[in-house]
Image (spheres, rainbow, N blue to C red):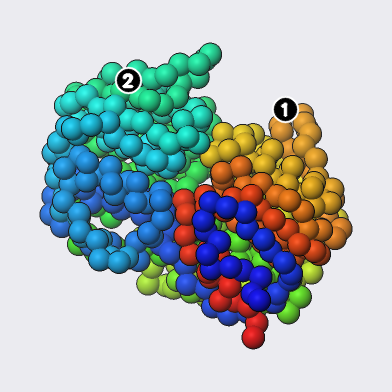
Amino acid sequence: MSPISKSANRAKPFVIKHKFIPVGCVTLPGDKSIAHRALILSALCQGKTTLKNFPLHDDSLATLNVLVALGTQIRRNHNQVLIKGRGLAGFKKPIQPIFVGNSGTTLRLILGVLATQSFKTKVIAGKYLSRRPMARVNQPLRLMGADISAKVKGKEEYTPIVISGGKLKGIVYRLPVASAQVKSAILLAGLACAGKTKVIEPLISRDHTERMLKKFKVNLTVKNNHIILNPNKSLVSPGQIYIPGDISSAAFFMVLASIIPGAKITIPQVSLNPTRSGILAVLKRMQAKITISRDKKSLNFEPTGNLLIKSSQLKATTISAQEIPTLIDELPIIMVAACFAKGQTVIKGVGELRVKETDRINSMVSNLKSMGADILVKKIGAQECIVIQGGKQLYGAHLKSFGDHRTAMSMVVAAIAAHGQSKIDDVGCINKSFPGFLTTLASLKKR
C-alpha cells in the first residue's frame, strides 16, 4: 500500500505509515503570489489578458471570485484564465459583502483596489483570516483618503472591514515591518491617486507587484528599498502572462529530496525571483545538492528555471533576521530540514510567523517536539529566535495541522522521513495553496 493516499485531502485524519524514496519529476502549479497580482492588474487594465498555468487552489480562486463579484468578466478553461479588464475605476458595487476566504493576499490587495472605487464595500473573511491583524494595511490607506472601519480588539483591527473609496492622495509611507502585502495594497491604491506614492521598506520584501506593474506599463521606479509610483490614466495589458511554478511549493520537495537517502527530484519552470529565493540560499549553505538551470529568456519579468535536488548530508546554519522577508513562507519546512542537519541551526527574527494563517512558531515547535526534535524558542536580544539541535532521529507521532497549509505540508514531509507511523489530524487546509500536493507525493514513490 502506498504511504500517500490520494483521497487524503479531505478534512479527516491522514496516516503516513512508512518511509519511501522520492524519485521523479514534479510539475508545480503557478506561483500564487504572482497569480493574485496578475488577476488584479488584468482586471484593472483596458483590454483582455490571458493567464497561463493559473493555480487552481483556494487562495487564487478567492481573488478570481472577488473580481467576478466586482463585475469583471472572467472565463476559465482548466488552468488558463481570460480576463476582460474594466479599467482603474470601472468596478461595480457588489450586491452583497465580498468574501475572501482565508486568503490574506486577496484581502490586503483588494483593499488597496477598493480604496480607489467610488462605492462602499463590506469585506468578510474565513475563520483563520479573521484572526489576522489588518491595521497595518488599513492605516496607510486611511492616510491616502480611504474611509475604513473594522472590528477593533485592543489596539488591533480585524475583519469584517467596511471600506469607502474615492479620491485619494499620494503619500510617502515608511513600512514599520517589511510586508509585500501591505506594500502592494498601497501601490495598488496609488494607481488612482492625485500625486505620486512612495513606499520605503525596512528590508526588501518580495517584489512581484513591482514587476507586474511594470509589465502593465505603470510608471514605477525602484531604487534599493524605495518604490515610487506615478499614477497612470490607464494600464496596458501585456496580452498574455505565463505564471511560473511556485517556489514556496517547490520548497517541500527540495527538503524532502535532501533529507531522504537515495532521493532525486527535478522541478521544471519554477520561479527564481531573487526576493523569493532565500530558500535556495539557505539550503545551499546547509550543503543541499541543488543544481539550478536558469531560463535566460525570463529575466525581464519573473526569472524562472529548472531545479535538480539530490539526497544530501545537511549541515546546520544560522539564518539572519535580514533574510526572513525572502523566505517567510518557507520557514516551516526549513525547520524540518534543520532537524535532519548536523549541528545547531538558529533562525533569528521569526516574530512575523506569529501572525500568519496560524501561529506558525507554535504549530511547528509543538509538532516537531512531539516527534522528538530538539527545538526551542528564545529571545536573543530583542529578537524572537528558533534554535534547533539537528541530527536526531524523528519518530512518528500524532500531529496537528492547526488549519494551516504550510504546517500541514511540512509535517507530511517530516513524517515521511521519520521512523514509525504518524497521523495528522486534518490536511484539508492544504487546498489553500496546493490541492495536488499529496497526489504529487504519491507519484514520486520509487517503483
Residue 195 visible in the snapshot? no
153 lies above or below 299: above
Identify the amino acid type marked 2.
Ile
The x, y position of residue 120, in whole percent, is 22, 24
Q: Earlier in the sequence, mark 1 or mark 2?
A: 2
| In the foreground, 400 or 292 | 400
Q: Residue at x 64, y 49 (%)?
A: 425
252 lies above or below 43: below
Q: Is residue 357 left or right of residue 138?
A: right
The x, y position of residue 209, in whole percent, is 37, 47
Q: Secondary structure at mark 2?
A: strand
Q: Residue at x 70, y 74 (%)?
A: 20
Is the N terminus in the top left, top right, bottom left or bottom right quadrant? bottom right
Q: How many marks?
A: 2
The x, y position of residue 323, in whole percent, is 62, 46
Q: For mark 2, does the 10 Å Cα neighbourhood hold few (<14), some (14 to 19), or many (20 or more) residues?
A: some
Identify the amino acid type marked 1.
Ala
Q: Residue at x 32, y 20 (%)?
A: 148
Q: Is residue 332 left or right of residue 376?
A: left
Which residue is under mark 1?
A: 382
Q: Is residue 151 left or right of residue 46?
A: right
Residue 244: image quadrant is: bottom left
Q: Secondary structure at mark 1?
A: loop
Residue 316: image quadrant is: bottom right
Front tag of 1 and 2 = 2
Which residue is under mark 2?
A: 148
Q: Residue at x 38, y 68 (%)?
A: 298
